[in-house]
């Protein structure tokens, strides 16, 4: 009996080995680390949702490109009134949703009203807060009136959370997403893969790929193996930077290091003594060697930052020189504050490697200047509960990945408890600013104020590490929004 | 016999009921809110309250427990908070990977372990026995994720015989689906086989020293025959016990191997649901696993009765 079974098994093995499927000709298989919980970008904060559907399946009035610029999408053009309160959007004609229903002004009104309704579960509801009214003037024109001038309004309308959905299909987008994009959803094998197929009826430039398959591969070693085995064509965010040197020598693959909107910070509870003392916070900033941190955590990839602002932005100023790595200065500041060696603090670390690995290094550096740090590893759900919602923490490490999010420092009750009146005034002035010049100046003032007050210890900008088949072109190098835009991707011959 | 089965069925039901209470209480104590996990860093309190209301999370705990129990009695495991699809659908999808994988791994470990265990026991003290014991020692000691990675390295990235992982689904043809399960099956089966071989060997050696085997031998039966006819059957009880434990363990405990081969198994579903605080999914999976464990234990007990008449007599 046993012998028969063994033979049978051997036969299966041989058969299985021969049954290898032939490679898909014009498809791309994209590896992603986290599976999206659902596929409706207007009803969840998970970046993984946008990583699959943004630009591919769903489109908004505007869209954001690889460089962070705002481009027309479902809105062909727009007029802005002199008081910057009224936006008149001229819409594309002839665009259709994937279920065949036509796109027009009523869909725009429906989508924007739905996102800002009292019962909305949009994770970025604040984007829509300035909107006073939305009027469908005629099928191809929408007039949006704001209650106050809002500088980022066109950029905000390009977020995944602001995509246009149809009233007929909106309720089911979580499992069967229906958008207007160049790819349509074809199937989702939960836990492993999501497949998109080219939309033959697309209103604009058609996609070059026939099919895009997103494969969920959470384990870094598995990701590397899948790449080498040829099971995956691209990892837009490769989870194993320590293996890059091995890939770099392989002509089959291309490596693209880009920027993200992720400011990685050592967040400090500004409301809790002794961290309400600016000297203590400045001491912490002086105690950290950012370069060493980047080398250890990101294998050298990542840009040091001195404030809460991305280095690739035009309004960026380099403030990394404000608190150079100087343990002696840190000790002196602590002594000055009368807290030379008696500070004890808990450092709460969420799961990502930048926090867990980085936390070990930072804890050691802080101990070296006399701050007695205890590490506590927690899950994301606990982090959200303890740190983010209840502000129950001393120190934590986290990456703020939302684009243009310097405004969080003006929020009352935000978890690091800053909300200085002067900073709030700066943010209010920013919304009123009429010219780019004025705007840049205000953004720079804001960066300086955060650095001066050493609100948090600003560490580094998270890099985007893309690894893909050298013949697969047209993917994003930078990620101004968390998305894997495959609309322009194509295979080259050689 | 019938009374015994009835008794067992009753205690099975009671175990499940107690399990629902324990699972619910434990998960309700765990800190973390599924709504804030879904809404992220920018959500305002009003949006969170709205979502919690939609998910029914604003009800008091006892009310949520009875709602859950009520729908459970009707065979409904509820709707996942994050995926927004029925939990039963999710579990069935995952079982379509985990169950075949577990069955195949268990079968493979049996096919390896029983002959090897018998062989080693028959040659106890000799060199070939020592070799088997040494090999199983190694099999127990090797971490299965490392072994899985080794399989991937040899058969996927170097020889390209198999995919490095993933699961195409049963719709794509049984061949492709089975192919995706070959390496995971081996990775899961070998460590289990090592344990099972050791158990078989030691159980057999113990039985071989018993009076009835000596009687069989003195009756003129050859060593091999007395071993197969008399000793093996009596040595099966510990083997069955271990096998039952292994089966239920593999159903959701294959998570490390599932991760290496990025398979959509039950283990990964639970892990993902726990991190996202999709508690209704966790509750559903755990209750299904408890049911499976209880059922397997029950089946193992019946197998005892078949293997060993003394158990039957003792119980009735």
Image (tube, helix red, strand yellow):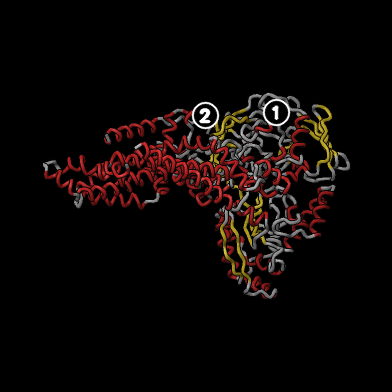
Question: Residue drawn 43% across and 36% down?
Answer: B180
Q: Secondary structure at mark 2?
A: loop
What separation in Å lies between label 1 and label 2 (alpha carbons)? 35 Å
Q: Nearer the viewer, residue B296 or A160?
A: B296
Residue B152 appears left or right of A282: left
Residue B54 x/y as whole percent: 67, 40
| Residue B154 visible in this rendered orientation of the protein | no
- Residue B248 in percent (x, y) is at 42, 43
Residue occupying the point 55% across, 47% down: B24
Image position of A432 (left or right of A280):
right
Residue A459 sits above or below residue A220 on the image: below
Say which label, 1 or 2, has the lower sequence index. Answer: 2
Residue B175 pos. (x, y %): 42, 29
- The residue positioned 52% from the left and 34% from the top of the image is A494
SS category of the residue bearing label 1: loop
Quarter of the image where one finds residue A350 = bottom right
State the image coordinates of residue A428 (x, y, percent, origin top left): 82, 52
Q: Residue at x 78, y 44 (%)?
A: A129
Whether residue B188 can be seen here: yes
Q: Nearer the viewer, residue A69 or B133?
A: B133
Crowd around label 1: few <14 · some 14–19 · many ≥20 (10 Å): few
Q: Chain of mark 1?
A: A
Q: Are marks 1 and 2 on the same chain?
A: yes
Q: In screen coordinates, is B99 left or right of A316?
A: left
- Label 2, residues with CA under 10 Å away: few <14, some 14-19, many ≥20: few
State which quadrant residue A185 falls in: top right
Q: Nearer the viewer, residue B54 or A264?
A: B54
Residue beneath disc 2: A25
Residue designated by label 1:
A168
A95 sits left or right of B190 in the view: right
**Chain letter for mark 2:** A
């Amino acid at each position: 009996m046993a012998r028969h079974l063994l033979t049978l098994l051997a036969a299966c093995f041989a058969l299985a080995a021969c049954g290898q499927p032939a490679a898909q000709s014009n498809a791309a298989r994209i590896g992603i680390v986290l599976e999206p919980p659902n596929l409706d970008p207007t009803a969840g904060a998970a970046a993984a949702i946008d990583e699959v559907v943004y630009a591919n399946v769903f489109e908004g009035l505007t869209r954001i490109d690889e460089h962070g610029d705002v481009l027309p999408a479902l809105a062909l053009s727009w007029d802005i009134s002199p008081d910057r309160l009224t936006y008149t959007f001229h819409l594309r004609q002839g665009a259709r949703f994937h279920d065949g229903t036509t796109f027009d002004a009523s869909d725009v009104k429906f989508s924007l009203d739905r996102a800002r309704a009292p019962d909305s579960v949009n994770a970025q509801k604040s984007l829509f807060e300035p909107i006073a009214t939305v009027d469908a003037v005629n099928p191809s024109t929408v007039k949006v009136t704001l209650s106050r001038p809002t500088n980022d309004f066109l950029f905000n309308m390009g977020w995944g959370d602001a995509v246009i959905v149809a009233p007929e299909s909106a309720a089911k987008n979580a499992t069967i997403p229906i958008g207007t994009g160049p790819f349509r959803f074809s199937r989702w094998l939960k836990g492993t893969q999501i497949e998109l197929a080219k939309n033959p009826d697309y209103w604009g430039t058609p996609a070059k790929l026939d099919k895009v398959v997103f494969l969920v591969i959470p384990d870094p070693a598995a990701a590397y193996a899948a790449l080498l085995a040829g099971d995956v064509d691209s990892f837009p965010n490769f989870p194993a930077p320590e293996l890059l040197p091995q890939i770099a020598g392989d002509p089959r693959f291309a490596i693209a290091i880009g920027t993200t909107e992720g400011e990685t910070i050592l967040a400090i509870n500004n409301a809790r003594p002794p961290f309400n003392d600016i000297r203590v916070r400045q001491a912490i900033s002086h105690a950290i060697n950012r370069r060493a941190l980047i080398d250890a955590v990101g294998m050298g990839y990542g840009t040091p930052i001195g404030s809460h602002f991305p280095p690739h932005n035009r309004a960026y100023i380099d403030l990394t020189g404000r608190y150079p790595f100087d343990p002696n200065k840190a000790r002196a500041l602590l002594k000055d504050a009368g807290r030379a060696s008696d500070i004890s603090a808990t450092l709460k670390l969420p799961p990502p490697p930048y926090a867990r690995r980085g936390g070990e290094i930072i804890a050691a550096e802080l101990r070296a200047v006399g701050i007695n740090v205890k590490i506590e590893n927690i899950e994301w759900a606990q982090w959200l509960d303890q740190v983010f919602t209840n502000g129950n923490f001393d120190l934590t490490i986290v990456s703020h990945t939302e684009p243009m999010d310097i405004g969080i420092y003006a929020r009352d009750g935000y978890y690091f408890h800053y909300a200085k009146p002067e900073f709030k005034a700066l943010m209010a002035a920013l919304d009123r600013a009429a010219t780019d010049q004025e705007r840049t100046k205000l953004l720079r003032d804001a960066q300086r104020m955060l650095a001066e007050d050493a609100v948090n210890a600003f560490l580094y900008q998270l890099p985007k590490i893309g690894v893909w088949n050298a013949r697969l072109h047209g993917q994003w190098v930078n990620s101004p929004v968390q998305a894997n835009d495959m609309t322009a991707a194509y295979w080259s011959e050689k | 016999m019938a009374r015994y089965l009835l008794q067992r069925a009753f205690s099975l039901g009671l175990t499940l009921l107690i399990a629902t209470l324990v699972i619910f209480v434990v998960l309700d104590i765990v800190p973390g809110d599924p709504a804030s996990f879904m809404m992220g860093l920018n959500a305002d309190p009003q949006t969170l309250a709205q979502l919690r209301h939609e998910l029914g999370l604003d009800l008091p705990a006892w009310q949520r427990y009875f709602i859950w129990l009520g729908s459970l009695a009707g065979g409904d495991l509820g709707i996942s908070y994050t995926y927004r699809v029925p939990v039963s659908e999710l579990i069935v999808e995952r079982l379509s990977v985990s169950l075949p994988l577990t069955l195949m791994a268990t079968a493979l470990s049996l096919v390896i372990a029983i002959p090897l265990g018998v062989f080693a026991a028959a040659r106890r003290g000799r060199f070939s026995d020592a070799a088997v014991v040494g090999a199983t020692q190694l099999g127990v000691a090797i971490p299965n994720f490392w072994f899985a990675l080794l399989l991937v390295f040899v058969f996927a990235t170097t020889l390209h015989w198999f995919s490095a992982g993933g699961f195409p689904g049963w719709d794509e043809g049984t061949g492709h689906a089975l192919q995706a399960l070959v390496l995971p099956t081996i990775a899961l089966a070998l460590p289990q086989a090592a344990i099972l071989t050791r158990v078989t060997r030691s159980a057999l050696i113990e039985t071989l020293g018993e009076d009835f085997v000596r009687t069989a031998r003195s009756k003129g039966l050859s060593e091999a025959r007395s071993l197969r006819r008399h000793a093996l059957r009596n040595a099966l009880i510990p083997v069955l016990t271990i096998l039952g434990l292994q089966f239920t363990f593999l159903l959701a405990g294959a998570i490390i191997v599932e991760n290496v081969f990025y398979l959509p198994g039950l283990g990964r579903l639970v892990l993902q649901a726990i991190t996202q605080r999709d508690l209704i999914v966790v509750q559903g999976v755990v209750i299904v696993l408890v049911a499976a464990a209880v059922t397997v234990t029950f089946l193992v007990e019946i197998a005892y009765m078949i293997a060993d008449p003394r158990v039957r007599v003792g119980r009735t």
